[in-house]
Image (cartoon, grey):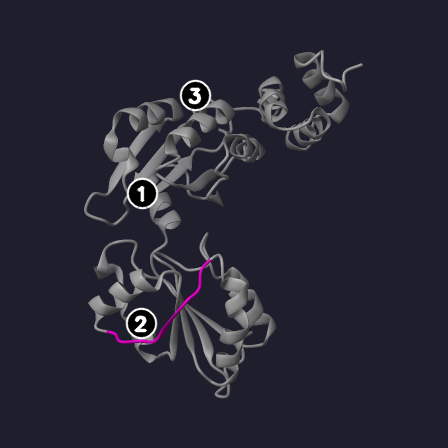
Amino acid sequence: MNQQTNRHGVLYLVATPLGNLDDMVPRAVKVLQSVALVAAEDTRRTGLLLDQLGINQQMLSVHDHNERDRIPLLLDKLGAGQSIALVSDAGTPAISDPGYRIVAEVVAAGFDISVIPGPCAAVVALAGGGLPTDRFTFIGFPPARSGQRRQLFSQYAHCRETLVIYESVHRIDESLADAVQVFGADRRAVVARELTKLHESWYRGSLTELLSMAREDANFHRGELVILIEGQRADEPADSLDLEKLCRVLADELPPGRAASAAARISGKRRKDCFELIMAFNPEHPEAD
C-alpha cells in the first residue's frame, strides 16, 4: 500500500481527451493546475490543451527517445517535494505511450504514484466494438515490417479473447492484409477511427471486408485507428491451427531452424515435425537433408 508523505512530491498520471475537450475530468484539471511541472510527450500539443483549459504551467518534453534521460531530473524534483503530472498526446499515459519506465523508476525510488483516470482509446473501442469484452489482449502497435507483424499475429492466432491493436493510417492496409493471412478471411473484426472526435467512424465486418473498405474508402486513412479482432470461437477446436500456413509465414521471414522453433512454440507441435514441414517447402535449402 502506498504511504502518502508530505516530504516528497507525487507523480500523477493524467489521462487527457482523445479529441473531445469535454471529456477532460475536473480532477485532472485541478491536478494540472497544482503541480510544479507537466511532463508531456509533445509540449506543443499539450500546450494547446493547457491553453484551452486556461492553465499556464511549466512543461518538460518526455518522449520515447529521451524518457530514460529525463528520469534522474524527475526523481530529483519529486525528492525535493515537487509534484509532477505525466501526460501523453491523448488518452492514458504509459498505455502504449511513454511513461512506463518513469513509473517503474518512481515506484522503485519509493515515491507515490496517483493515476487520474480518463479516456483510453483501447477501452473506448472495446466498449463500442460489439465484440466480446469479458477477456481481451492488448497488443498495442505491431511492428512496421510485414514479416515481423505476421510473426507477432501468429502468436495470437488461437487466442479466445478479443485482440486490441493500435495502427497507423499509413500501414492499415498492410496490417489488415497480414491479419487476413494469419487469422483467416472470415474472422470478425472492427476498426474504430477518430474516437470521440467529429468524424468518429466504426467499420465492422470480416477481416476481408474491412480490407476492402480500407482500399476503397479514403476516409479510412485519416486520423487514428484501433483494430479489434475477434478471438478464436469456442466451437473451433484449439488444434484447428493451419500448421502449414503458420510454417510458411514464419519460413518467409526466418531461417528454417528458428522458424521451426517458433512454429513449435506457437502450435504446441513437435519442433521436428515443424522443421520437416518447412523443409518440404524448401527442398533445396542447405539445411535440408
Point 46% across, 39% down: residue: 163
The amino acid pointed to by label 2 is Arg
Cα distance in 3D space between marks 2 and 3 = 45 Å
- In the rendered image, which residue does mark 1 sit on? 128
Q: Nearer the viewer, residue 70 or 157?
A: 70
The amino acid pointed to by label 3 is Ala
Tag 2's secondary structure? helix
Tag 3's secondary structure? loop
Cα distance in 3D space between marks 1 and 2 = 25 Å
Query: Looking at the image, is mark 1 or mark 3 earlier in the sequence?
Result: 1
Residue 185's disc is 3
The amino acid pointed to by label 1 is Gly
Side (left or right) of 279 relative to 201: right
Counting the numbered discs, the total is 3
Classed neighbour count for the residue bearing mark 2: other residues with Cα under 10 Å, few (<14), some (14–19), many (≥20): few
Q: Which residues are magenta?
A: 55-63
Q: Main secondary structure of the magenta part?
A: loop
Point 25% across, 28% down: residue: 217
Side (left or right) of 242 relative to 172: right
Cα distance in 3D space between marks 1 and 3 = 23 Å
Point 49% across, 26% down: residue: 183
- In the rendered image, which residue does mark 2 sit on? 27
Q: Position of residue 191 (x, y in %)?
A: 34, 36
Query: Looking at the image, is mark 1 or mark 2 earlier in the sequence?
Result: 2
Classed neighbour count for the residue bearing mark 3: other residues with Cα under 10 Å, few (<14), some (14–19), many (≥20): some
Q: Depth-wise, is mark 1 or mark 2 nearer the camera?
A: 2
Q: Residue furthest right?
A: 289
249 within the magenta span: no
Tag 1's secondary structure? helix
Query: Looking at the image, is mark 2 or mark 3 earlier in the sequence?
Result: 2
Classed neighbour count for the residue bearing mark 1: other residues with Cα under 10 Å, few (<14), some (14–19), many (≥20): few
